[in-house]
Image (cartoon, helix red, strand yellow):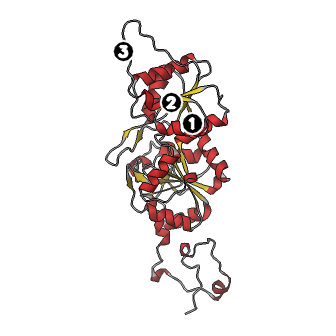
Amino acid sequence: MAVVAQAGNGATQPQRATLDAKRAILDKVDCFIFDCDGVIWRGDSVIDGVPETLDMLREMGKQLVFVTNNSTKSRAGYLNKFTGLGLQVKAEEIYSSSYAAAAYLESINFPHDKKVYVVGEVGIQEELDLKGINHIGGPADAGKKVELTPGMFLEHDHDVAAVVVGFDRNINYYKIQMATLCIRENPGCMFIATNLDAVTHLTDAQEWAGNGSMVGAIRGSTKREPTVVGKPAEFMLANIADKFNLKREQICMVGDRLDTDVLFGKNGGLTTMLVLSGVTTEEQLLSPENSIHPDAYMDSLAALLEVKQPVAAHARQPLSSWQQSEWRPSLPCSWLHPLSQPRAAP
């Protein structure tokens, strides 16, 4: 259900979601997948109206799933963040790219006698531990330096069969070289990226260089393309759909990025909704150079609360005798359709 209009050149152009469009999406969708950074929070601050919107959707019986490409935390770590921000979320509703990396390795039966070299933070390691997958690197290599003295030779572990690259605030030359050696010299060693995001929201004051910069360094040194397990890769969506026993047409992806969130949804056959509370601006969305169009867009997630607003008195129309006796609401929530309660004839 695309909410678009024909532009002057014949191409479709996204439009803001109208009240009717919001109702139609809520009527159609059983599950909402939310990106976190720029949709639920910015840095360490909850975006205005988000708690109320989530409560409304839960009251309607919607399944909520929270996904993030940020791999610095495990699902347990993100649960602590949600709780600390005053958001009531269940652990099983959280899906991080750190978990996606571990789930991917499990899905391909990663050998128990092999290791993963981690360029990233503790979130990846915690998820690998839960899957029983051996790993080295990560924060333990944060302070290591390479002294390029004459004849310097860096030994690497020949049992490493996969290198996982996630966001790493302590990236250094040692980690890049170790990852490069494992990928280039260990036969069959896999190169896995949690995501390719160009920027991320570490604080609510500005954007910061994202995991794409870390992956780019190793992609450049190995001349290899990584297997991406986070958005917009298919693996993450397939895993979520299987976990919650959902069909693609039942799901709406809500995000703030065109090239990850919206593309993730469109590639997977989902309804897509863009919010302008994060990375993407309205100017970028409507630019002739942009070819990724969501089904609807809004200023923020809180714009969905409009469906809960009562209809103005002058907009109400008396019900006919047939409506009073035969009409039934199409949704379980009476406030979603203002005419869902029969009224006495005037």
State yes or no: discs 2 and 1 in contact (Cβ < 8 Å). Answer: yes
Residue 229 visible in image? no
Q: CA distance from mark 2 to mark 3?
A: 21 Å
Locate residue 101: give its quadrant.
Answer: top right
Decide: few, some or many residues near mark 3? Use Cα within 10 Å; few <14, some 14-19, many ≥20. Answer: few
- The amino acid beneath tag 3 is Glu
Decide: few, some or many residues near mark 2? Use Cα within 10 Å; few <14, some 14-19, many ≥20. Answer: many
Q: Residue at x 53, y 41 (%)?
A: 97
Disc number placed over residue 118 in the picture, else none: 2
Mark before the other along the chain sequence, 2 or 1: 2
Locate residue 207: give its quadrant.
Answer: top left
Decide: few, some or many residues near mark 1? Use Cα within 10 Å; few <14, some 14-19, many ≥20. Answer: many
Residue 337: image location, x then y, percent: 56, 74
* Helix, strand or loop for disc 3: loop
Locate residue 27: give its quadrant.
Answer: bottom right
* Helix, strand or loop for disc 1: helix
Q: Which residue is mark 1?
A: 128
- The amino acid beneath tag 1 is Leu
Mark before the other along the chain sequence, 1 or 3: 1
- Could you tell me how many numbered marks the image carries? 3
- The amino acid beneath tag 2 is Val
Mark before the other along the chain sequence, 2 or 3: 2
Q: Residue at x 37, y 21 (%)?
A: 145
Q: Which residue is mark 3?
A: 147
